[in-house]
Image (tube, rainbow, N blue to C red):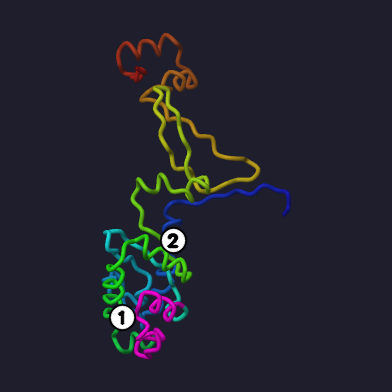
């Protein structure tokens, strides 16, 4: 907005704390909920969990507001009989009646009756936030990840091509980050020593004495 550049910085530690922000902030309310670490079956909100399907895959559901999703979710997975049961809803009643663990087990049992693709179609149709818990190999082929420019194909000198994970921060003015292979062991050693003031003769003596090692390409 100002036309002036701005310094941008972050760290892995800060990113990790931010990603756990909801739980960290909630820890201030010590009179509510269960203190971590906890069994996922005893979580305050049983809807934020991963469910094992009939074909051995896991569906991660994300419904932070239990009250908003309760009737819709519980009905679409086949428990219409408790959709109006005040023992389970709202979430305060669920806790008061100590039914969270029972509800978790009921959902896990029901999800285990169908394959992932069957459930994905049902949950998508009901607008329930969910995703397949993918393997690393599946993430490499994930269409959304590629469309979001998460990866970069690197071609190496020996002809091999490998996929690198790109850093997630994008800069409009600076453009995309340049990706190039890392140097082989000691590959840029002579160049660095020259910058430090060593002569070609001194560098050769180091190489001959093997006090400077340069990995040779094959």
Q: Is residue 8 left or right of residue 17?
A: right
Element under disc 1: helix
Residue, x 38% and y 58% (percent of image)? Answer: 132
Q: Position of residue 30 (x, y in %)?
A: 36, 79
**Numbered badge on residue 166:** none
Residue 76: name its quadrant: bottom left
Q: Is residue 141 left or right of residue 35?
A: right
Nearest to N terminus: mark 1 or mark 2? 2
Taking 118 as reference, is 10 above or below it? above
The residue stretch that appears in magenta = 69-91
Which residue lies most toward the top here?
201
Quick one: label 2, few (<14), some, or many (20+) residues within 10 Å?
A: few
Residue 181, image x and y in percent? 44, 30
**Can you say which quadrant of the picture contains the N terminus?**
bottom right
Q: Residue furthest bottom?
A: 86
Q: Residue at x 46, y 22 (%)?
A: 192
Q: Is residue 98 above or below residue 1?
A: below
Q: Let me know if residue 124 is in the magenta part.
A: no
Residue 86 belongs to the span the image colors magenta:
yes
Numbered disc in front, either 1 or 2 = 1
Residue designated by label 1: 100
Q: Which residue is mark 2?
A: 19
Asked which quadrant contains residue 214, the reply is: top left
* In this view, 81 is above or below 69: below
- Determine whether 98 is above or below 38 in the image: below
Please state the total of marks drawn on the protein image: 2
Question: How far across and down, in percent of the image, does residue 31 sit?
Answer: 36, 83
Rendered residue at 35%/57% (across/down):
133
**Label 2: element kind:** helix
Residue 17 lies, in percent from the top left, at: 42, 61
């Amino acid at each position: 907005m100002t036309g002036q550049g701005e310094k941008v910085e972050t760290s892995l530690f800060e990113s990790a704390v931010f990603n756990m922000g909801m739980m960290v902030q909630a820890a201030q309310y010590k009179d509510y909920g269960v203190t971590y670490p906890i069994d996922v079956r005893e979580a305050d909100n049983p809807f934020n969990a991963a469910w094992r399907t009939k074909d051995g895959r896991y569906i991660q559901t994300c419904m932070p507001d239990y009250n908003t999703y309760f009737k819709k979710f519980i009905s679409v997975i086949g428990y219409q009989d408790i959709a109006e049961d005040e023992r389970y809803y709202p979430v305060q009643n669920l806790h008061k009646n100590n039914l969270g663990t029972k509800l978790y087990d009921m959902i896990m049992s029901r999800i285990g009756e169908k394959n992932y693709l069957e459930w994905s179609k049902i949950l998508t149709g009901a607008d329930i936030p969910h995703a397949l818990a993918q393997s690393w190999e599946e993430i490499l082929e994930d269409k959304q990840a590629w469309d979001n420019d998460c990866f970069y194909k690197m071609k190496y000198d020996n002809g091999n091509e490998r996929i690198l994970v790109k850093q997630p921060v994008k800069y409009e003015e600076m453009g995309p980050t340049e990706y190039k292979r890392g140097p082989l062991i000691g590959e840029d050693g002579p160049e660095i020593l020259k910058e430090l003031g060593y002569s070609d003769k001194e560098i050769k003596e180091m190489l001959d004495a093997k006090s400077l090692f340069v990995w040779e390409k094959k």
